[in-house]
Amino acid sequence: MGLISTVFIVSAQKTPIYKDKKAPIESRIKDLISRMTLDEKILQLNQFTVGYNTNVNNEGGVIKEIPIGIGSLIYFGTDPVYRNEIQRNAIEKSRLGIPILFGFDVIHGFRAVYPIALAQACSWNPDLVKSASEMAARETKLSGIDWTFSPMIDVVRDPRWGRVAESYGEDSYTNAIFGVAAVNGYQGKSLSDRFSIAACLKHFVGYGESEGGRDYHATDVSAQSLWETYLPPFEACVNAGAATVMSGFNDISGVPATANHYTLTEVLKRRWKHDGFVVSDWSAIRQLMFQGVAGSRKDTGFKAFMAGVEMDMADSIYLENLKILVNEKKVPVKNIDDAVSRVLRVKFRLGLFDNPYTPIVSENERYLSTESRQVTEQLAEESMVLLKNSNNTLPISSSVKQIALIGPMAADKKNLLGSWSYNGREDDVESIIEGIEKEFGKTATISYAKGCDFDGNDESGFSDAIEAAKKSDIILLCLGEKKDWSGENASRSSIALPTIQEKMAVELKKTGKPIVLVLSNGRPLELVRLEPIADAILEIWQPGIAGGSPLAGILSGRINPSGKLSMTFPLTTGQIPTYYNSRPKARPYPTNGIYQDIPTNPLYWMGYGLSYTSYKYSAMTISSSKIKRNEKLIAEVEVENTGKIAGLETVNWYISDPVCTISRPIKELKYFEKKEIVAGGKVKYRFEIEPMRDLSYTNSEGKRFLEAGEYFVMVNDQKVKFEIIE
Ligand code: BGC
């Protein structure tokens, strides 16, 4: 009898590698891509919007039907339940269950709106900016959003350009430091942490060079300025692990940033090894036609994709054309696979495959935690800049019994939020008047009169304002800009405040009462006529929800102001561009190259800001007057607080290289530190100069070089020479 054996083949359905939480991310990506059809891949490279479109500048932003396997959605809502429903559809109903990446513009806070970026940089406190970004990430994540289109690290030199509000100012190093702080705050220790969101560096690259401050216009970015000014903040943030990058609307030496193979592929991906993805700015792919480098939608898609833009924001051009381009053998499938793998990598890193849904917690738990309010308030406090204080007008003396609070900003809430504050609510904002009443309500009588609007010609409110002023011991004149006067598509031909506001100041001056000018705005202003009228000037920027108390605290002296400008205030609009680190002029003599009609210097340079205490800097010491290229040099200065109250002093360290193959800026910021100094106390500040990092320069191809010769290290008004020897 033959042996009959039955073999049972147990064919357990194996979990695909891409669904295996324990498998390495790169294996999961490879496995998933091997299972995807071309259509499925192309869908991953598209971003649509869901819900209403709140960005008025996002023209053509029609809400389309959401394809089930879409790569990403801009989510304008705050409701995680709806977001989870959309996600569930993608996970359960699409063939491979690839999660959607939800993005949104969380620019300076979500519900807890903190000061605009230009103000944040005036705090010179990157740790605080990191905390604020962490708070924002938490609120964002709990609202169902995994990805913010922030930070904006465009170096800005023209205050007519509305987007200066979104930047960390005119200096490249400052943008790098604060950009890195924001990336670290958003992304946490790991992208897969519970409250981490992916950052997006924008706008790559050179958008800040906007000609005449006109938004969306051409930019003339030379290869040299690209490498010395515009690229460094991006490189620093890529090194800090920023997950994604957004391509800009501008062009670079004639090639639009969104079709620029050099910056997107050669620099970002090959040199810097960025392995996340690039999303186009809104409609930036379609705009390639308007910019004169593509003749059809298909052509724009081809140019942007081959240059290195992986995701099409809102245009549907990739959706319509990539398959055709692949079939025509114009776009190789390997490029599609590389692009998809980049998008998937970010999704895997965020943990979206393993935890695709947002935990549902109540609005109370989601927003405005005590900690986030504290951080917002501290950031507002540290970013306010005291610009003038004649005869110690501030702090307001306790003998003041009558305060006149005047101006269109005094009782306003909405405009304190600044641009890009979609989820900010007026109800959450503490206005100036509320802060003042809380601070001074018990000791003084406060008379409020709006006086005039932000613009227009209506002077009918002047008489009330003058009456309130006459009764008062001091006038707090609160002027400024509406929130939509800066931000995207908000260029101004003049950076002066509208005439009506200046006119009211002139009238109030006639009362002879001391005037404290409180300014809330999203850009440096032309103060040439207002400055002489004011006894004191406090720049509060657009502080977000918690500006009232910090402002009032500075006015009363409860808080010692410590902010310093992150962007120069030109004296007049005609001085633009004026920034601290221009190159030396060909004729250095005092009578050459100056304006004939106005002074040539700006009103306030970047780095300027007053305090209620005084500081004395000791003579700077350096560890050696000669170093070799591979040796460090230590520069130190001791700062003494010679006043009666404690203060936070930021020390900015600059270097200068007077003779170099490529002419370098007169001075370059290389390091800064902010420390507390008690009254009468002395604190040492130290700058460890690493020659290759701090003294080298770049050529127009991005090659860094370090030349032997004389250099200077500068702090405050001191300049000390040293040498690099061969
Ligand atoms: C802006 C970007 C923004 C995008 C999405 C564009 O108009 O330039 O900064 O992230 O819209 O709203």
Image: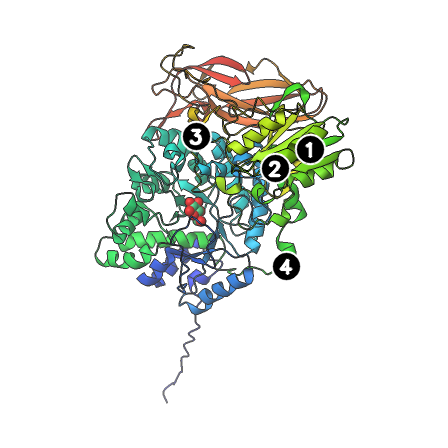
Residue at the limit of the structure toward the left, as seen here: 328
Residue at the limit of the structure toward the bottom, as seen here: 1
Spatial CA distance of label 3 from label 1 is 39 Å
| Residue labelled with disc 1 | 468
Q: Quadrant of residue 230?
A: top left
Mark in the foreground, 4 or 2: 2
Spatial CA distance of label 4 from label 3 is 43 Å
What's the residue at 27%, 59% (across, down)? 323
Mark 1 vs mark 4: which is more N-terminal? Answer: 4
> Going by the image, does 415 lie left or right of 62?
right
Pointers 3 and 1 in contact (C-beta within 8 Å): no
Residue 103 in picture, x, y percent from top left = 47, 53
Mark 1 vs mark 2: which is more N-terminal? Answer: 2
- Please state which of residues 631 and 698 is positioned toward the viewer in this rendering: 698
What's the residue at 42%, 48% (across, down)? 57
Q: Secondary structure under badge 2?
A: loop
Q: Which mark is residue 461?
A: 2
Q: Secondary structure under badge 1?
A: helix
Mark in the foreground, 1 or 4: 1
Spatial CA distance of label 4 from label 2 is 44 Å
> Going by the image, does 62 lie left or right of 505?
left
Spatial CA distance of label 1 from label 4 is 45 Å
Q: Amino acid at mark 4?
A: Ser
Q: Which mark is residue 362?
A: 4
| Residue labelled with disc 3 | 157
